[in-house]
Amino acid sequence: MGLRGTAFRLLVAGGVGVSLLFATAVPTAADDISDAQARLRTINKLKGDLRDNLQKAQAQEIALEQQLQETRDTINQTMDKIAATERRIAELERQIAALDAQIAEEQQELRKTKAEYATFVRSVYKSNADPLALLLAAPDFQGFLNRAVAIEHLTYLSNRLMDHIHQVDLLLHSQQDGVKTKKKEADKNRADLVDQKVALLAQQAHQQDLENRLRQSIAQVKWELVAINGQSAALAQRIADMEIARQDQLIAEAEQAAWQQAQFWMQHNLFTLPNAGTNHSTKYPLIWPLQQGSITLVFGPCTQSFEPPGFGYPHFHTGVDVAYKQGSPILAADDGVVVAAGSSLLNGQLVGYGNYIIVAHRNNFFSLYGHLLGFQVKAGDSVRQGQLIGYEGSTGNSTGPHVHFEYRYGGQPTNPLPYLPPNGPNSFNQ
């Protein structure tokens, strides 16, 4: 047994050693593969999230550029109005100068006439001429009549002259007051336009800053999409979270800029919000803007990556989406005044809300209707609850025909469902 036994024991021991080696080496390789696969899944998911946010940020960049162009157009229109008002002011100043010269000339003429009349009165007084004695001293009856007519005519002319002096003075000063009032109004209009221009320039600077920051963020995300493959899953997760949070904040600011446009229109246009009409619902503040179809997304937290953060959630839908047949009528949910009706259009492509309408209502409420096929109203139009304002579409960042309906109080999104008739889209309006 000596040598054979020893060899057998070594063989058995060697076999056990090899078994132990494989028992430890194989699981280690499997763990490495598993870790690599998990890292790859994490990296791919993060890349997907970054790509989603990148697409959303690029759409907002296009919408911001459209808003910037609209602001630039409004600035140019305001500058044209300022130039026209300044020309009007210059013309009024010329009119005032001409009236001042005319008044001075008339007053000089009136002073001369008054002086001549005073000389005449004094000469008559010094002569102690008695009108009755002059009449009785006439050589015959015809001379008596001639003198009587002359005295009467002189008295008439004196009274008429004084009336003329008074009327001319009143007329000239009235014209002068009228022109000065117009100039005062023109001066105020110019001051208002200058203030409007200052506000527009500030709005333009804010929008430009948003666009610059958004572009920087887009460039950073593009870089991260390339660099993420060489990073650990934990580091990639931290960087992706940071970039997505930064972009979400910028996108939320960019979307708010659309509402700022409506607020700007309200601040620089005179309008009166209508009281509830005779056909207004007496039971609910709102009616459904799309009265058929189904709700596809409600107000509140959601999982859609293209929705911006809000109310502490990473993704929050700020309205209610109702889907039905494209071209279906969209009705005003409440009485109000249209403060925005436009299209987010760039290079022939509708982006963002697409075709949209914003309506101001009583008590600081606002409603927005997005992704419309088209609209039937313009800024400044008064609308009644139930009035046709547009048609359902799928314009802008939309996944299919629907209306995105937002309801805001004091600029903050609020759930519209408690204000609407229950049980989903319907035609209830009592």
Image: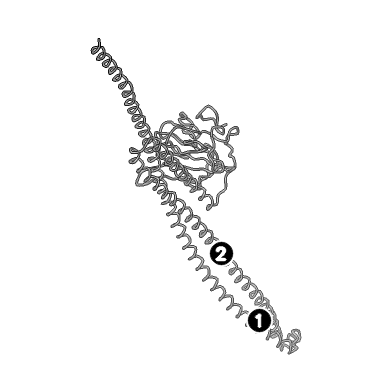
The image quarter in which residue 36 lies: top left
Nearer to me, 368 or 379: 368
Residue at 57% x, 64% y: name it.
184
Image height of 383 relative to 99, above or below: above
Instruction: Report the side of 15 relative to 134 (left or right).
Output: left
What residue did someone put label 1 on? Answer: 114
Location of residue 118 in the rendering, given as x and y in whole percent from the top left corner: 68, 84
Res. 182 mark? 2
Res. 309 mark? none
Residue at 67% x, 81% y: name it.
154
Residue at 40% x, 49% y: name it.
65
Q: Residues within 10 Å of mark 1 (few under 14, many from 20)?
A: some
Quarter of the image where the N terminus is located: top left
> Mark 2: which secondary structure?
helix
Q: Residue furthest front?
A: 2
The amino acid at mark 2 is Lys
Image height of 418 relative to 20, above or below: below
Q: Residue furthest left?
A: 4
Location of residue 76 in the rendering, given as x and y in whole percent from the top left corner: 43, 57
